[in-house]
Image (cartoon, helix red, strand yellow):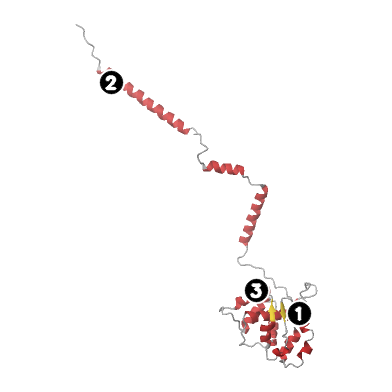
Amino acid sequence: MVKKEIGRPGNKSSRKGSGRKSAKGSRKKKKEKKEKKESEPQPVSPLVYNSQVALEELLVKHQRSPVEEGIGSVRAELAEYQASRTKGQQITVRMGLSRKICRFVLPMDMKELENLTALEYLRRYCFVCSRRQNYYNKSFDKFDRDRDGILSLKEMERALKDVYTDDIASEKVQELAELVRAVSETQFDRQLFGAMCALSERLFYTSFVTEDTEDAGNGERHRVEEADFCSLTSRFRGCDIQGNMKSLLSML
């Protein structure tokens, strides 16, 4: 009779333990292999957009030239200079006077001047070039505080001084107002204020302009105006024109 060998419990458990160890080691190797694969740089397909790669390619392709770098530094210095300047700081330059920025005319029938005041004459018969009128309007708007389009006598005097950047004596402005018989009730609109400014340029031209600072042609009147005023005395004959009107026309 043959006896069957019965395996010991210890042997069976030992075989089972060795199997567990081998499975655990296999999983560990797979994990290490996976980590190694992930750590290796992956090939990038050219069809996949990569912002960093695109930026590097653009920097290589469009390198800044020395000229552009120089312009950039100049712009930076200019911006720094402008930032360092005092806000609102401006250089004020007085306008250059001229006798050609306006034209004074006389009517064909001089009797039309008999009942006119000097201010009415300026409103009707003084023509200022548009560019100069725009310049005058800046001072007019500055002192037209209530924006009604009208300046009082005092406001007109201050605005006129502003036209000359305060480089004209108050006495001269007052003399001009007296010449045209302007009073405290007189109202000056844009047109009349422009005519007053043009008249001041005509009368005060020699006070501000000397031979060495005079530009060619600015001291001359328009030829049509010269023709009108060349025989002024004879044109007064037979006309009853007010004394201040005659004085104004003679000074022109």
Badge number at residue 134: 3
Question: What amino acid type is highlighted by mark number 3?
Answer: Asn
How far is mark 2 from mark 3, CA to CA? 111 Å
User: 51 and 106: which one is in front?
Assistant: 106
Label 2 is placed on what type of residue?
Ser
Q: Which residue is mark 1?
A: 224
| Residue 132 image position (x, y, % from top left) | 68, 74
Q: Quadrant of the C terminus?
A: bottom right
Tell me which label, 1 or 3, sits earlier in the chain: 3
Residue lying at the far left of the rendered structure = 1
Query: Which residue ends up furthest to the right in the rendered image?
Result: 211
- For residue 53, which numbered disc appears in the image? none
- Frontmost of labels 1 and 3 is 1
Q: CA distance from mark 2 to mark 1?
A: 132 Å
Residue 172 sits in which quadrant? bottom right
Lower position in the chain sequence, tag 2 or tag 3: 2
- Quadrant of res 153: bottom right
Measured as percent of width and height from the top left, residue 114 is found at: 70, 91
Mark 1 burial class by Cα count in 10 Å: few <14, some 14-19, many 20+ = few
Q: Position of residue 152 (x, y in %)?
A: 61, 83
Identified by mark 1, the residue type is Val
Residue at 31%, 22% (x, y): give it: 17
Q: In the picture, residue 215 is in which quadrant? A: bottom right
- Give the mark nearer the N terminus: 2 vs 1: 2
Q: Considering only vertical position in the picture, is 39 above or below 122?
A: above
What number is the disc on residue 13? 2
Q: What SS does tag 2 mark?
A: helix
Q: Along the line of sight, which residue is nearer the eye, 6 or 137?
A: 137
Q: Residue 118 at what x, y percent from top left?
A: 68, 87
Residue 206 visible here: no
